[in-house]
Amino acid sequence: SLVTERLYYKITDTVKMCYYHFMYWLRERIHPTWHFTAALLGFVGGVALALVWQIEPWLGYIAGSCLVLLALWRARRMLLLAAIVGGLLIGIARGSASVNSLAEYASLYGQQVTLTGTITDDTDAATQGTRIRLGAIYVQGAALPGQVFATVEDAQGARRSDRITVKGTVNTGFGSFAATITGAATRIERPVPGDVALEIRDTFARQVRSVIDEPQASLGIGYLLGQKSALPAELVDALLITGLTHIVVASGYNLTILVRASRRLFARVSKYLAMLSSVSLIVGFVAITGLSPSMSRAGLVAGLGIWAWYYGRKFHPLTLLSVAAAVTVAINPSYVWGDLGWLLSFAAFAGVMIVAPVATAYFYGKEKVPFIAQLLVETVSAQITTLPIMIIAFEQFSIIAPLANVLILPLIPPTMLLVALAGIAAWLPIGGEAVGWLAERLLNVQLAVINWCADIPWALQEPKWSWWMALGYCLAITLAVLYMKFRSGYKLYNASLVE
């Protein structure tokens, strides 16, 4: 009939129009930054995939580089897929090379060996022995890649940057560790002049402890220097229950406080001085705390953020996240294969820099956001993005964490300042005890809050999720963020880590 024919042509014309608009949209040129970001995300995904699927590295490097260069050259929206696939191939190639090299440990599993390595982080005392993370591994004079987790007897006094020789049994690794070894230390060597930054940290920590009692001193040193090895076991458990562990480890939060304070203070004098002081602070803080996965991410992100601020540029948080992830994974592919510190660090960063600004814009629009409300949004956002990792890895999460963070986090910057002043004043004939007394009173308040939150019976929950539940949760959060971003019209370029 005539009506059916007209309806047919109308539908056909509509489909054609949608098709032409869609093809035009695909052919549009977009900023090459998006292709660069897509390639980096593909690279990280490829390294993760290499754990179960390897290819010839040279083939992946050549094919992947060609696709990425094509995408960057034409910069069309349709070539985003080529950038992702190219990055994926390069990532699989990098991961395959690392998997092949780590296979050298397979012949050592179950064997009694003598292993020498460099201590890469602070040691932890345990009932079975001292727990040590080792890098620069040598077995019988042959260098081996990756890191080894060691549980060692007779290692009292060993510290970061020492060379230690362990005689024991090698077993399979976990997380980012290629292997584990359990045995006794036969030799500990301290290089000269040794780890200067570590010596400065420990000397300053001793000065702080001379004017502030325990456990307040260890808590304050944890805030300022990220040293948590001296914390009492009861306090460590309380911090875990309240979701506050991140405040006493070397993390992006501590570094962000320092960088923001430095930038705001010296920007009144000159922009160059603010940039120089902030970069020096980043380098010094990373040197003192060590190159842990979370600090590698934090230092790189803070450095890129201050560089962009100095030149009047802005990084999209997704690009910043991709650069930091790709660089750290390129250096150590095992991070993405199960290093919980690395995974939690990036998840929390995504929450603070992507979820929190979008949620704030959706709920508050252009209104000025109260400080407590902003702090609550950022805390909850970080909890939301780290939740699946916490449940899958530890089968627990803290319900009381948002409240505990809102109560504690505003007190951390003044506490860090007082602890720093107390450590400096301890070298002076007078003044150290007075400043230490003030810092101790403020730390007492925080300990009371932490213990009160930890004593709530329902504070820590222990759910069990399957992988499909975690994926479903991530998809739901992604859709919710996209919806809030669409409704609010917020531009993520406005999010800044250092301002």
Image: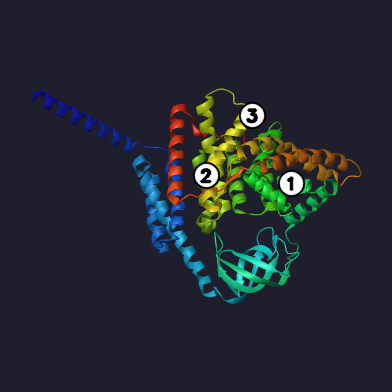
From the viewer's perspective, is 228 left or right of 393? right
User: Residue 277, percent across and down?
Assistant: 69, 41
The numbered mark, 3 or 2, whose residue comes first in the sequence reads 2
User: Residue 383, percent across and down?
Assistant: 56, 41
For marks 3 and 2, give the one nearer the viewer: 3
Q: Residue furthest front?
A: 457
User: Residue 232, percent across and down?
Assistant: 74, 52
For marks 2 and 1, give the one nearer the viewer: 1
Q: Which mark is residue 321?
A: 2
Query: Of helix, strand and loop, which one carries label 2?
Result: helix
Could you give the CA–CA distance between mark 3 and mark 2, rounded to whole angstroms?
Answer: 25 Å
Query: Of helix, strand and loop, which one carries label 3?
Result: helix
Quadrant of the snapshot with the N terminus: top left
Q: Nearer the viewer, residue 372 or 74?
A: 372
Relative to residue 273, is residue 94 depicted above or below? below
The numbered mark, 2 or 1, whose residue comes first in the sequence reads 1
Would you say the residues marked 3 and 2 are in contact, meaning their CB atoms lie under 8 Å apart?
Answer: no
Query: Of helix, strand and loop, which one carries label 1?
Result: helix
From the viewer's perspective, is 386 left or right of 408? left
Residue 96 appears in view: yes
Q: Nearer the viewer, residue 225 or 498?
A: 225
Quadrant of the snapshot with the C terminus: top right
How crowded pointer 1 is (Cα within 10 Å; few <14, some 14-19, many 20+) is rated as many
Could you give the CA–CA distance between mark 2 and mark 1, rounded to whole angstroms?
Answer: 30 Å
Q: Which mark is residue 219?
A: 1
Point 68% across, 43% down: residue: 455
Point 28% across, 32% down: residue: 21
How crowded pointer 3 is (Cα within 10 Å; few <14, some 14-19, many 20+) is rated as few
Point 78% across, 42% down: residue: 419
Say which amino acid is labelled 2.
Leu
Could you give the CA–CA distance between mark 1 and mark 3, rounded to whole angstroms?
Answer: 24 Å
**Residue that mark 3 sits on:** 371
